[in-house]
């Protein structure tokens, strides 16, 4: 308003203000011209007041308050494990580390000044576990190394890494055939996997079937590896056994094959026991699918089926079919071909050999002692062979493998010793070797096919304090015999039969093994040798096979060697120890040149050779 | 399995989150006993912040999303309440402001950080447990004291970072099995 009034007074003053404001001195006064509206500028303006309402409604008002977004969850409650009494505390004064020293292996990748990098074995969900909950169950378990090192599961010895893998594999398998070579710790891996199943609530009732002589061994191993697990052995009269079969609250029940077959076959369908896990040790016992043993084992109600054997194939690849049928991974009565067997083997069989996993294990040194028969043996042998072949030829087409078998046994017995004079080239060699072994404080195990031979040897080896362990020894006396052999420094030799002593025993303190005569199947011989050459062995094991030259033993050995080389196993390459087949019927006939005599000459008798599928000896 | 802790038992929680491309974050909480044996596991469905949340939460978005949202949901959901929740992600420490359960970030004890920096104040917020160093929330110093009373229940050989790996694997398996369909 003031400005307007001032401006309206005169053009001069207006200019003057402009000059003063701007501070610019104009060189001459500007000439003001009349425009006609100058007077209007001098009028006082008269403003009017109008009322108007403001429009305060906005089209969009952003508003936001934090709120919690509802989230859905997926949950899994893991089953509660079986509670047991805590394991006994280590004895005072015994350093904890010493408990783990025996089988400890150096940690991988460790270097001075750094803590060792421990290998970690994680459980993997089995390929056939489809539900998320099942898969998460395995993924959420701790690594085996820390699980087993925890306070709940003290391990007396640190397992080897391949054993951790085996335990993890078994733990997550519904159907499994653990076929590690003898001596690699199948028993320990099985016990530990059982322990984890019980601890994690995956199993509450487990049945373990094994050959009768191995029951004390399993009991001992359970005590060593899982002392907190209650183990009940199936024994006693019928009423007691019936009670044991169905008694609740027994986590682990051990029975032998014979009792299993006898008891369960008699039991009515509705009383048949049910188990979370059935383990068959020495599962080759069910290789004959139609045997009562196999039928009974397959009929047992269970959720998981594990089979253990070091020799999944003793004679024919088809034997695997029997094991797969037990494991319920093939339809009942089906006969998979070799390609199918191979595919199933990859999925359901875990087999490791010593060559593969125990590179640092002291070697097994095999040596064949080829011996000339003594004169008396030679004479007796030739007579027996000549007469035997004549008798076989006279049988003509009525000859059976049993006839030939009897002659083979007779000749093998003479190769061991001459029954008339008692002369024995093998005994002479054995005595010579044993003198050296005893002088150095060593121990040896001797295997023979016959208890009669073992009994014959005992008095002749008196100076070495022999101990006898064969089928004729009552079961209760067997454990003390093994204990004495281990503890008595004067007991230098243990005489065993293949049938009783070949499986399941731990005799790794014996540095020498003698195979006094040859078994029909190298797999059985290997089992026998591996009583001594197994985990924990500190020195090389020397294995001596006695072979009498120019006898049936040499011929059998040649056939078996050829078969080892020729037979391609289903179990894959690098498995040198299981390329072992028994002699087939045709091969047994082939040990002698048998010819039926006819008027117009002679012709060969016996079955034609059928590779890898004939009747086994 | 009871949720009530006995005096000789310690229930440990292990919480991790992972980001699933295009779907957001999912979180998992594993409850174990003091020996690492799993007792319960919960995991969330994926959650993804919208643009508004991203703008408004700014730098606090991850602590809010992972700690308050995912972490609280998981802790509410588990039937077995843990005495301690261990994680590898410092963002999850925010969860401590919404729960009474101590939350700790586990770091390797051999990582060379011990005594190397931070001085006494930082060191006082750390607890050496098993083979790990646990770092707690700045505003909850009493958490260490409450855990000191139970530390004897955790074996020296315990690896408190290992179960976190199990949680991550379980989350990855869940994503593969459920959310990838």
Image (cartoon, rainbow, N blue to C red):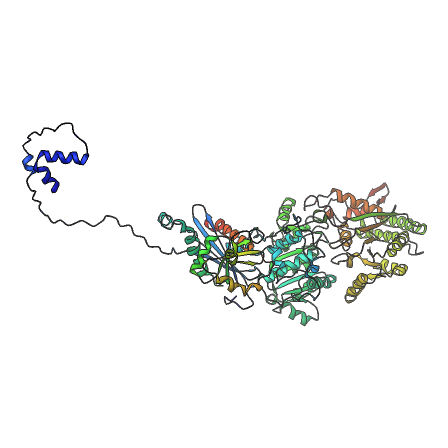
B42 sits to left or right of A422: left
Residue farthest along the top direction in this orientation: A27
Depth check: A83 or A452 in front? Answer: A83
Give above or below for A441 relative to B20.
Answer: below
> Residue A9: x percent and y percent?
7, 37
Depth check: A432 or A291 in front? Answer: A432
Image label count: 0
A216 sits to left or right of A24: right
Give the residue drawn at x 8%, y 35%. Answer: A10
Residue farthest along the bottom direction in this orientation: A239
Depth check: A130 or A409 in front? Answer: A130
Whether residue A400 can be seen here: no
Depth check: A92 or A558 in front? Answer: A92
Give the residue drawn at x 58%, y 64%. Answer: B152
> Residue A612: x percent and y percent?
73, 46
> Residue B95: x percent and y percent?
44, 57
> Residue A51: x percent and y percent?
11, 49
Quadrant of the image occupied by residue A325: bottom right
Give above or below for B48 relative to A33.
Answer: below
B180 sits to left or right of A125: left
Whether residue A253 can be seen here: yes
């Amino acid at each position: 308003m003031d400005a307007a009034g001032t401006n309206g007074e005169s053009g001069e003053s207006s200019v003057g203000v402009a000059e003063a404001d701007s501070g610019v001195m104009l060189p001459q006064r500007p000439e003001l011209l009349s425009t006609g509206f100058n007077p209007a500028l001098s009028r006082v303006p008269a403003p009017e007041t109008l009322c108007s309402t403001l429009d305060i409604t906005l089209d969009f008002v952003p508003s936001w308050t934090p709120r919690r977004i509802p989230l859905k969850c997926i949950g899994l409650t893991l089953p509660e494990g079986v509670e047991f009494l805590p394991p006994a505390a280590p004895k005072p004064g015994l350093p904890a580390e010493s408990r783990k020293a025996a089988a400890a292996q150096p940690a991988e990748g460790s270097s001075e000044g750094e803590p060792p990098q421990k290998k970690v074995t994680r459980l993997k969900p089995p390929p056939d576990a489809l539900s998320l909950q099942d898969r998460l169950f395995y993924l959420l378990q701790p690594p085996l190394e820390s699980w087993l090192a925890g306070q709940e599961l003290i391990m007396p010895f640190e397992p080897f890494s391949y054993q951790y893998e085996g335990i993890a594999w078994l733990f997550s398998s519904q159907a499994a055939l653990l076929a590690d070579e003898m001596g690699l710790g199948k028993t320990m891996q099985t016990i530990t996997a059982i322990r984890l199943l019980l601890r994690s609530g995956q199993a509450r009732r487990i049945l373990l079937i094994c050959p009768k002589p191995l029951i004390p061994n399993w009991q001992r191993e359970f005590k060593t590896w899982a002392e907190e697990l209650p183990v009940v052995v199936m024994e006693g009269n019928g009423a007691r056994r019936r009670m044991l079969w169905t008694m609740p609250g027994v986590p682990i029940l051990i029975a032998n094959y014979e009792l299993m077959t006898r008891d369960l076959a008699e039991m009515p369908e509705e009383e048949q026991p049910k188990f979370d896990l059935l383990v068959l040790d020495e599962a080759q016992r069910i290789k004959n699918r139609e045997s009562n043993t196999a039928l009974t084992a397959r009929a047992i109600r269970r959720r998981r089926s594990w089979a253990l054997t070091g020799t999944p194939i003793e004679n024919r690849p088809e034997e695997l079919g029997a094991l797969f049928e037990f494991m319920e991974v093939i339809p009942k009565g089906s006969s998979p071909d070799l390609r199918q067997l191979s595919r199933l083997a990859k999925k359901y069989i875990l087999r490791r050999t010593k060559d593969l996993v125990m590179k640092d294990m002291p070697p097994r040194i095999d040596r064949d002692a080829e011996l000339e028969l003594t004169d008396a043996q030679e004479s007796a042998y030739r007579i027996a062979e000549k007469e035997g072949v004549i008798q076989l030829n006279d049988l003509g087409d009525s000859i059976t493998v049993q006839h030939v078998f009897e002659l083979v046994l007779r000749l093998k017995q003479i190769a061991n010793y001459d029954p008339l004079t008692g002369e024995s080239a093998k005994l002479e060699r054995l005595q010579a070797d044993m003198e050296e072994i005893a002088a150095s404080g060593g121990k040896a195990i001797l295997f023979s096919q016959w208890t009669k031979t073992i009994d014959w040897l005992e008095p002749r080896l008196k100076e070495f304090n022999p101990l006898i362990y064969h089928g004729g020894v009552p079961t209760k006396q067997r454990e003390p015999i093994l204990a004495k052999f281990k503890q008595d420094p004067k007991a230098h030799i243990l005489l065993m039969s293949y049938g009783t002593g070949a499986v399941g025993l731990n005799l790794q303190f014996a540095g020498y093994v003698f195979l006094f005569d040859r078994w029909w199947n190298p797999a059985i011989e290997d089992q026998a040798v591996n009583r001594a050459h197994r985990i924990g062995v500190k020195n090389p094991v020397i294995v001596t096979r006695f072979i009498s030259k120019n006898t049936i033993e040499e011929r059998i050995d040649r056939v078996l060697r050829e078969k080892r080389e020729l037979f391609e196993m289903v179990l894959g390459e690098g498995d040198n120890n299981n390329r072992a087949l028994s002699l087939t019927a045709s091969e047994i006939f082939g040990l002698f040149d048998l010819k039926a005599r006819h008027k117009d000459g002679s012709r060969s008798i016996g079955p034609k050779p059928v590779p890898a599928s004939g009747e086994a000896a | 399995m009871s949720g009530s802790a006995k005096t000789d038992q310690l229930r440990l929680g292990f919480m991790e989150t992972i980001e699933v491309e295009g779907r957001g974050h999912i979180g998992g909480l594993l409850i174990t006993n003091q020996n690492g044996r799993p007792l319960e596991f919960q995991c969330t469905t994926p959650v993804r912040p919208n643009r508004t949340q991203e703008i408004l939460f700014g730098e606090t978005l991850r602590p809010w999303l992972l700690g308050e949202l995912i972490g609280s949901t998981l802790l509410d959901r588990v039937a077995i309440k843990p005495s301690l929740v261990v994680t590898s992600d410092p963002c999850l420490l925010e969860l401590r402001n919404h729960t009474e359960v101590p939350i700790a970030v586990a770091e390797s004890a051999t990582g060379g950080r011990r005594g190397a920096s931070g001085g006494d104040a930082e060191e006082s917020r750390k607890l050496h447990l098993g083979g790990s160093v646990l770092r707690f929330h700045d505003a909850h110093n009493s958490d260490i004291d409450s855990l000191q009373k139970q530390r004897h229940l955790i074996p020296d050989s315990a690896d408190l970072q290992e179960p976190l790996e199990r949680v991550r694997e379980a989350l990855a398996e869940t994503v593969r099995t459920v959310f990838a369909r």
